[in-house]
Amino acid sequence: MRIVKACYQTFPLVVAGAMLVACAANGIAQVPSTNQASLAANKLQFVVGTARIGQDGTVGVNFVTTLRQPNGLTGVLASSPTITGPVGFVVPGGAAGAYSFAGANVDAGTRHISSSPQVPLSNVGLINSTLGTFTGVYAYGLGPFNSDQSTVSGGYYPGMPNSTAGNGFSSSTYNGTSMVAVALGSGDGIQPLPYFSVDPMEYITGPPAVPFFNNGTYPTNFAGYPPGFTVVEIPPVAGSYSLSVLVAAQNVSPVTYSQTATLTTTTPLAAMPAPTFAGDAAGGGTGTVSVPAGVTETMVYVVDAVPGPLFYAIGPIAGSGVKAFALPDHLGKCTGAGCQNGASAGKSLNTGDTYFISAIGYDYPAFEAGPPGNTQQTPPIVGAPGQADITMSPVVKATY
């Protein structure tokens, strides 16, 4: 089993953390003493679809979820999700789980993908699950950003995952097969990806699709925004899927959010060829992508891997057929608001940089549902026929 994962909390969560659920010293979620939000006001959404994975040609299942406050921000800072599939949906017996040192994965051979309760830094009582202790549900998907017993200013976010020395992200084998790893033929082939650390390259929505943020005014290592999908490389099975999200708050009663979704058809979208791209020697370039029928919008993802990483996204590109796209020249790092438009603007790609490029086609409004533009509590995340299907192109590695 491989889980191709692109999901994480929004940037507004980083600056609004006092409003959300944090964690006590023992790692159990609780509400801060100020500006606390009502857990009952949060709403969970859950949609399922098919996923054609271009790198190896297999077909899996796509999960899309949101858990938001009425203002559209992430509902909680720590939660424990479990996804259960219909009869016939089976996690492979060889799935190792997040913690190879903690015994067999409790999900292996079952039809559920689960997370683990947080434990002390000593790891006493640690349960080996697919998603570990650090994975929660956020404003747009799942991600390794659960608050814990460490003191991290601003919380966790893409580029700054939960890396607590105890049972956190960095002590796990949750390293998956990221955009870079699939291009290089590496990765463990089991765990979710992308995993949103500083080093690996994943499917992350950056400029020009979203406002420029590589100007030093955002948190250190902030990598971008969520495309929102979580792809599980298990053959799709028609039927009902359920998502439960436990919030084990201490100073209020624990809350479990639940939703179900139906996979009506297991017929996937057609294959998405790898995009073409030619640099303009000035930092950007142009290319084309051949979008198959059934896709309503396409995003092209570019990662400046070395010496980056920097994450770019182009789109949404509407409709099917051969579509042109362009990567602007100056989206690299610079200093100060508006610097991308001035003399100090950094190039998107520099001569000699290693970069990766891939395209994903969606039959639902994937980009429109995500941050930072969407602040609805329950954004539309359903396409035809009542599910959320994607088709992923192979990943191309090249030198600029």
Image (tube, rainbow, N blue to C red):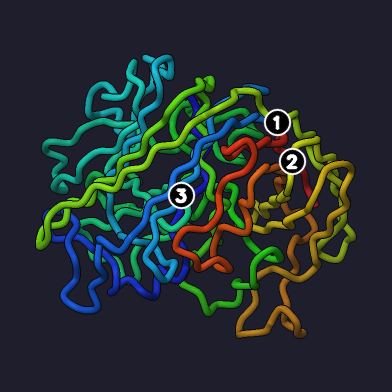
Identity of the residue drawn at 80% across and 35% down = 292
Q: Secondary structure at mark 1?
A: loop
Mark 2 and mark 1 residues within 8 Å of each other at the beta carbon: yes
Question: Relative to 374, is 291 on the left or the right?
Answer: right
Horizontal and vertical percent position of residue 138: 40, 55
Work out whether residue 308 can be spotted.
Answer: no
Mark before the other along the chain sequence, 1 or 3: 3
Tag shown at residue 83: none
Q: Is residue 388 above or below residue 41?
A: above
Give the alpha-carbon distance from disc 2 to disc 1, as whole Å: 7 Å
Amino acid at pointer 3 = Gly
Horizontal and vertical percent position of residue 272: 76, 34
Identity of the residue drawn at 23% across and 73% down = 36
Q: Secondary structure at mark 2?
A: loop
Provide the residue designation for mark 3: 141
Q: How would you rate the neighbour count of disc 3 (Cα within 10 Å): few for under 14, some for 14-19, many for 20 or more?
A: many
Provide the residue designation for mark 1: 269
Give the alpha-carbon distance from disc 2 to disc 3, as whole Å: 21 Å
Question: Relative to 339, is 350 on the left or the right?
Answer: right
Provide the residue designation for mark 2: 295
